[in-house]
Image (spheres, rainbow, N blue to C red):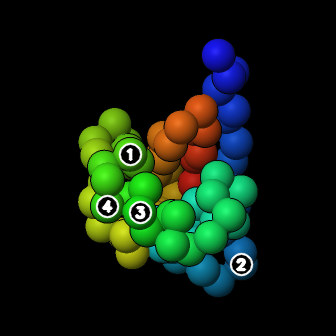
Amino acid sequence: MIAQQNTTFTLRQGEEYIQLIQLLKAVGCVETGAEAQESVTRGLVKRNGQTELRKRAKLIPGDTIEFKHYIITIA
């Protein structure tokens, strides 16, 4: 069993959000955009405890993403 990996992703100065598929790539949860899109489409990603099916969902500070063994908090 793989241990959970908790991480915080901090938005760059002036950014208000990051799109879900961009986050999955930036943090290293997936290797490609296609893999990120497929994971979201299959319902494998949760946002704030709810399944997120929007690939380009705008994640804002305070959102928490769960995917595989990752728990990512947006700051």
Amino acid type indicated by mark 3:
Glu
* Residue type, mark 2 in image: Gln
Dot 1: what SS? loop
Q: In terms of image quadrants, where is residue 9? A: bottom right
Dot 2 or dot 3: first in sequence order is 2
Mark 3 to mark 4 CA distance (whole Å): 5 Å
Instruction: Count how many numbered circles sit on residues in the image.
Output: 4
Q: Find disc 4 in the rendering and name its residue.
A: 41
In this figure, which residue is indicated by the disc labeled 3?
Answer: 38
- Horizontal and vertical percent position of residue 58: 41, 71
Q: Say whether residue 36 is visible.
A: yes
The x and y percentages for residue 52 are: 31, 54
Q: Amino acid at mark 4?
A: Thr
Tags 4 and 1 touching, CB below 8 Å: no
Question: Dots 1 and 3: beta carbons under 8 Å?
Answer: no
- The answer to which of 69 and 11 lies nearer the viewer is 69
Q: Is residue 52 left or right of residue 38?
A: left
According to the picture, the residue beneath numbered tag 1 turns out to be 44
Mark 1: amino acid: Leu
Q: Residue at x 43, y 68 (%)?
A: 37
Q: Say few, some or many: other residues with alpha carbon within 10 Å of mark 4 (under 14 / 14 to 19 / 20 or more).
A: some
